Amino acid sequence: MIPDSLATQPIFLCVDDTMVAKTGTRFENVSKLFDHAAHNGSNYLNGHCFVSIMLCTPVWKNDRVSYLSLPLGYRMWQKKESKLELAASMIRQVMPEFQEKKQAIILCDSWYTKQNLGSIVDEYQNLDLIGNARIDSVMYDPAPAHTGRRGRPAKHGKRLSVETDFAFSNEKIGDYYIGAHRVITNLFGCREIQAYVTATEKEHGTKRLFFSTIFPEDLQIFCAYQEKEPLFLSDSLYKNKDILAAITYINQHLTADLSLETVAKALFMSPYSLSRTFKKETGVAFHAYVVKKRLLKSKEILRKTRSATATFEACGFNSYTHFLRCFKQEFQLTPKEFLQEEAQNQFVRFTHFAGKK
């Protein structure tokens, strides 16, 4: 069902429930249910509640990536177990089918973003969860580094507030300003997760809170960026075999000589043909692509080494000055400022994910 060229893209498991009103009184398992979406003057109805799970898989549509939604199943809530337990058991039932997938992600609303469902993420190496959460959810800063002093190490830092502890992006991303923070919450035990707050306006706009067990740099999904502009940094979204070969070669030789002539020779192409085809297929010039790939790699190395001087050669730059200039131009931050914002868990917007036509 999933094309080979999209094999590295994630699949989504969407969890939700639906209610079916019943007017009779003798139906089995009929109960009084709260319907938050009701607009008939009452938020309660008599009926059945069904918990469902839906699979979303990536497919090609008009040379762009789209997602096909397929219902996997549903179960009636019978009060023997909670809706959360029903959802968790359905996830466990289907996950063996996706053991070979690189990434499976549960999507759910705030009713299901709770410990019962959150704990299932730890049972599968390739499973993560992204969900809406109650705006008053308790969150803490990650635990500070151990000072070596006597006493029990702190389990977490200070308690965080949606209103004061999230630095919003300077501009709207889509329809919202977005703030992000690495946090610890009891919903996911002791593990660090990413919290996002969206706001229609910075000061008095409506805010919503989301939790994600997967961090932005680890999320391999590109559909959202295709609405306005094509994404060009994916390793697997191109059908042209020459471009796929070029991208593979670049990824495997980031620290080597990646001049247009060198790569073209390795692929038995002319430099002109490679340059022209690469720009046509990806929307970005060959050299710019190489630089951006190296800069993406530099973020990973910076997080480990905490040193710009130890990073620039490890990601393929021959000149420290050139690396600093490219890094500042791409991220609007110096490496030092980048590390400072990372340490403060502030949101950094990387505009390089979207190509320029």
Image (tube, helix red, strand yellow):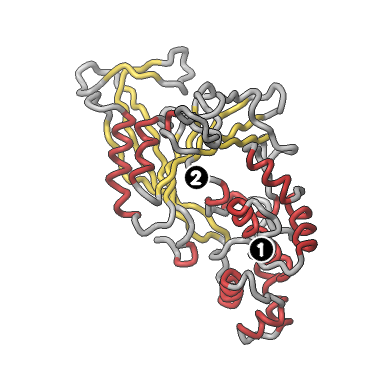
Q: Position of residue 51 (x, y in %)?
A: 33, 33
Viewer-proximal residue among 34 and 209: 209
Quadrant of the snapshot with the N terminus: bottom left
The quadrant the C terminus occupies is bottom right
Q: Secondary structure at mark 1?
A: helix
> Which percent across, then down, holds residue 38?
45, 20
- Residue 244 in percent (x, y) is at 57, 72
Q: Earlier in the sequence, mark 1 or mark 2?
A: 2
* Residue found at x 41% / y 33%: 189
User: Which numbered dot is residue 35?
Assistant: none
Mark 1 → mark 2, Cα distance in angstroms: 22 Å
Q: Compared with residue 47, is residue 248 higher up or lower down, i.e. above or below?
A: below
Q: Relative to the observer, which residue lies in front, 12 or 328?
A: 328
Answer above or below: position of 58 versus 129. Answer: below
Could you tell me if the residues under marks 1 and 2 are in contact, i.e. CB atoms within 8 Å?
no
Q: How many labels were placed on the picture?
A: 2
Image vertical order of residue 20 relative to residue 176, above or below: above
Residue in the foreground of this view, choosing between 285 and 301: 301
Is 258 on the left or on the right of 136, as rendered?
right
| Residue 190, picture quadrant | top left
Tell me the crowding category of disc 2: few under 14, some 14 to 19, or many 20 or more residues within 10 angstroms, Cα based: some
The type of residue carrying mark 2 is: Ile
Q: Is residue 223 above or below residue 62?
A: above
Residue 294 numbered mark, or none: 1
Q: Is residue 129 left or right of residue 173?
A: left
| One can see residue 226 in this view | no
Which residue bears the numbered disc 2? 214
SS label for mark 2: loop
| Farthest top residue in view | 41
Q: Quadrant of residue 42?
A: top left
Drawn side of residue 17 relative to residue 207, left or right? left
